[in-house]
Image: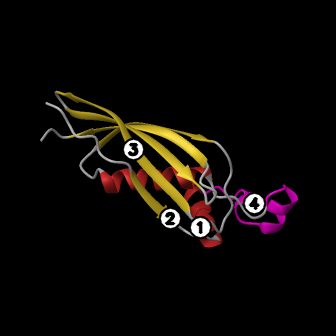
Amino acid sequence: MTHDVVPRVEEHRGPITRMHLVEWCAAENDYYILHYDERHALRMGFQAPLIQGTYKFALLGQLIARCWPEARLDSVSIRYVRADSEGIVLTLSAEETACEEGAGGTRRILALTVTGEDASPSATGEATIVTPQT
């Protein structure tokens, strides 16, 4: 049986505010000053506090859960390519690059990307999900 490849899905999140960053610090219990203090970010050579990589990772997880709600997540990986500062809108995308039917369902490989406002990737990754057979 063949499966149609799911088209690329994309979602815009933001602008990411200082409140989002501080809430994420609390959720992780990780209060690294670079993620909420503008003066510190400026001293480190950035224009504003940085968006946590794990925040981007969580947003990608939400995208997968919304677009493939019936799926079981088998694996996921992410590579942080560059930093993004608060105040921007992030574009999250997932694109199916392969699928294979098996006894336990259809195994799908997704290419994951986070881009900032300049449209260059700030995080890339891959997820393997299994969707029930239809």
| Mark 4 / mark 1, whichever is N-terminal | 1
Residue under pointer 4? 33
| Element type at mark 1 | loop
* Amino acid under disc 4: Ile
* Discs 1, 2 touching: Cβ within 8 Å: yes
Q: Earlier in the sequence, mark 2 or mark 3?
A: 2
Mark closest to the chain's N terminus, 1 or 3: 1
Quadrant in the picture for residue 26: bottom right
Vertical position of residue 22 compared to residue 127: above or below:
below
Left or right: 66 as drawn, with respect to 18: left
Image point (65%, 69%), residue name:
87
Helix, strand, or loop for circle 3? strand
- The residue under the point 87% across, 59% down is 43
Residue matched to label 1: 16
Crowd class of label 2 (few under 14; some 14 to 19; many from 20; radius 10 Å) = few
Across and down, in percent, residue 24 comes to 57, 62
Which callout, 2 or 3, points to the residue nearer the camera?
3
Q: Residue at position x 66%, y 56% from top? A: 84
Could you classify mark 1 by the number of other residues whose Cα lies within 10 Å: few (under 14), some (14-19), or many (20 or more)? some
Residue 7: give x, y in percent of width and height: 33, 47
Magenta residues? 29-46
- Mark 3: which amino acid? Glu
